[in-house]
Amino acid sequence: MNAEWRHLKELVAAVLKEAKAMGVDAAEVGIVHESGLSATVRMGVVETIEFNRDKTLGITVYRGTKKGSASTSDIHQDAIRTALEAACHIAEYTEEDPCAGLADKDLLAREIPDLDLYHPWALLPEEAVKWAKECEDSARGFDARITNSEGASVTSHIGYRVYGNTNGFLAAYPSSRHGISCTVIAKTEEGMQRDYEFTVARDPKDLESRTSIGQKAALRTLRRLGARKLKTREAPVIFEAQIAGSLLGSFIAAISGSNLYRKSSFLLDSLNQAVFPEFISIKEVPHLPKGLGSSPFDSEGVATRERNIVENGILKSYVLGSYSARKLGLQSTGNAGGVHNLMISHTNHDLPELLTEMGTGLLVTELIGQGVNIVTGDYSRGAAGFWVENGEIQYPVEEITIAGNLKEMFQRLVAIGDDVEHRSNILTGSIWVDKMTIAGD
């Protein structure tokens, strides 16, 4: 533990002590301290170099079941006292809420495992610029049809998260996140296309090479040239792994406590019901070493733990923080602030094998817009990708819309590829849905 990290923990303890001295019944304090560097190059010219160093302190106090919150980016004593007084003042005027309060004491994390999340990178600005240029150069020099660029970026960030409350919890952990990305444009007489590639990791040693990222960005862009529209039809759809996680993101939204207690989810009252085919299991793995979604505790200090959310197609658990759990008469699942590394079972098919088995249908590689209704499950999004016949890609397609209902789509999953996407906290392969409506000409 370095001196800065120790200082932040001492600061949280001092604020909690002061809050109790001001007569509140309970309090919680969190500090997020982040710093980093990012450099972007476009067409061989440095476009931006940015440093950031941010600290935010949030305070929540409880007077009985009345709650008040305030935050400040100034962590000097006077600013913190002003924020604390503001939180106390707000609590005097809010309504009583029997579900408000700190997380249950017996659910708080007692051991803080080292999840290997902290790998600082001594990246100098000139090095970041050099790497970004090399990345973009590898894309621009890959093919004469790559005529323009939206830039290549190199980023490096570290942070500390400290949380404490008056139930005796005080803990902290550091983390890091680094990345390289590139977006380029290809042009022919038939038109223009753009696409991108990226790599992200906790440890800079785990990043893919910048030249590889540039070349992949070029390849992904070139393969979209000559895109056509499709006639409106129904057909099987495979969501490429890079975007397939969005389907599981919608599933998590539907089983999240805030949507459930508001009765605004298409999966209301689905606990212990079959929501996927029997071959599907989904588990949360919050202690995955170096995982992008790993965390030893949630934003309320509740211990995170590995658990099965879906077993053999059956929904076994919701996604809850303390407040939503109390509203539903349940217990927090350690998900205040979100989920931590979702893993979905796969069927030992790589993407080419999925295409072969599908035979004829649509491979979606890009989704556009937000057309997901969590209340009804209705799903309609703009898309681009490739039309597949006889198990092989025939041509790229664009300006289409894919539509269905998520409740039915989840039941109609045919297979999950083993081409698992690791650049997210949702680890899934490509997802094959047996039938969707494709709207085109």
Image (cartoon, rainbow, N blue to C red):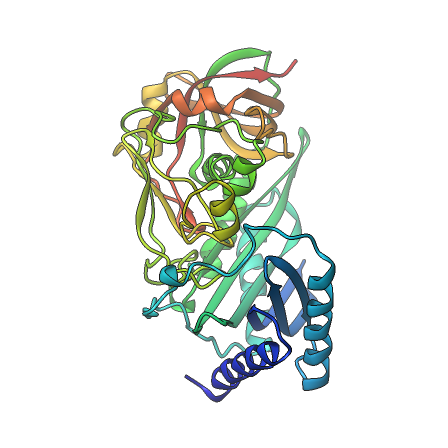
Going by the image, does 375 lie left or right of 190? Answer: left
**What residue is rendered at 50% in x and 29% in y?**
364
Going by the image, does 235 lie left or right of 183? Answer: left
Camera-side residue of 421 and 397 = 421
Residue 141 seen in the current view: no
**What residue is rendered at 32% in x and 69% in y?**
113
Camera-side residue of 403 and 212 = 403
Residue 213 seen in the current view: yes
Residue 319 vertical placement versus 433 (above, below): below
Residue 430 vertical placement versus 393 (above, below): below
Quadrant of the drawing holding the C terminus: top right
On the image, the x and y values in percent for residue 434 come to 40, 18
**What residue is rendered at 54% in x and 30% in y?**
265
**Which residue, as the protein is rendered here, is positioned at the far bottom?**
3
Residue 72 falls in which quadrant of the image? bottom right
Quadrant of the drawing holding the N terminus: bottom left
- Numbered circles on residues, count: 0
On the image, the x and y values in percent for residue 123 come to 52, 76
On the image, the x and y values in percent for residue 374 come to 57, 31
On the image, the x and y values in percent for residue 3 come to 48, 89
**What residue is rendered at 64% in x and 53% in y?**
96
Going by the image, does 120 lie left or right of 195? Answer: left
Residue 372 falls in which quadrant of the image? top right
Camera-side residue of 174 and 31 = 31
